[in-house]
């Protein structure tokens, strides 16, 4: 699993496309900016036939989840997601999972409690992702730095 993070509009998606030569590589790019993850257990076999999976915009999922669930449930749900995809990836050496998430932890502390919860949950989820990922990249202004 490869986790790519960095500031908003700093070139994360473009970097992933160029690094993995996705214009030449069969892949499934799933944008979750709508705030929902696909249901893995019913859809994985039918939809996810490509050996290369990209999940883009995961911070949006947490924004939706903090309005519906408590923090411990969100962490459990996210851990289940990354564990299932990590297992999917490990079952075939040709498979790669890339997760892209925006880092918005630097700067002003949000005034609204729900926005603070979103920021906190996103940070914890990113920590959980990093603990599973084999590789982690930070992209700022189109320049990537590998930190794991």
Image (spheres, rainbow, N blue to C red):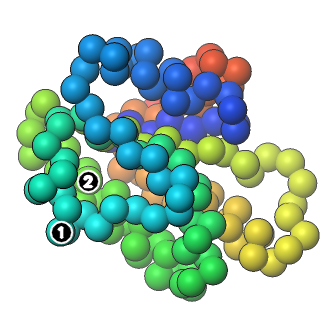
Is residue 101 or residue 148 the one in the foreground? 101
Residue at 29% x, 38% y is 28
Return the residue at label 2: 85
Left or right, 63 with respect to 114, comes to left
Q: Which residue lies under the disc numbered 1? A: 42
Q: Is residue 13 visible?
A: yes
> Residue 88: percent from the left, percent from the top?
17, 51
Q: Is residue 112 above or below residue 82?
A: below
Q: Residue 83, how many percent across, how many down?
A: 28, 60
**Where residue 14 sits: x, y (%)?**
52, 23
Circle number at residue 59: none
Residue at the (53%, 63%) spot, across then down: 35
* Residue toward you, 55 or 104: 55
Question: Is any atom of residue 124 visible in this view?
Answer: no
- Answer above or below: position of 17 versus 117: above
SS at mark 2?
helix
Whether 11 is drawn above or below 2: the answer is: above
Q: Tell me the distance, in whole angstroms, between the alpha carbons under discs 2 and 1.
A: 14 Å
């Amino acid at each position: 699993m490869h986790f790519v993070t960095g500031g908003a509009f700093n070139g994360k998606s473009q970097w992933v496309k160029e690094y993995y030569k996705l214009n030449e590589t069969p892949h499934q790019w799933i944008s979750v900016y709508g705030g929902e993850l696909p249901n893995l257990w019913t859809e994985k076999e039918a939809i996810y036939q490509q050996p290369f999976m990209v999940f883009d915009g995961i911070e949006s999922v947490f924004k939706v989840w903090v309005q519906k669930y408590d923090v411990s449930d969100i962490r459990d749900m996210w851990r289940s997601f990354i564990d299932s995809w990590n297992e999917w990836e490990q079952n075939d050496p040709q498979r790669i999972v890339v997760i892209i998430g925006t880092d918005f932890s630097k700067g002003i502390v949000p005034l609204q409690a729900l926005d603070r919860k979103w920021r906190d949950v996103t940070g914890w989820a990113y920590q959980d992702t990093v603990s599973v990922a084999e590789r982690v990249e930070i992209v700022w202004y189109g320049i990537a730095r590998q930190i794991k």
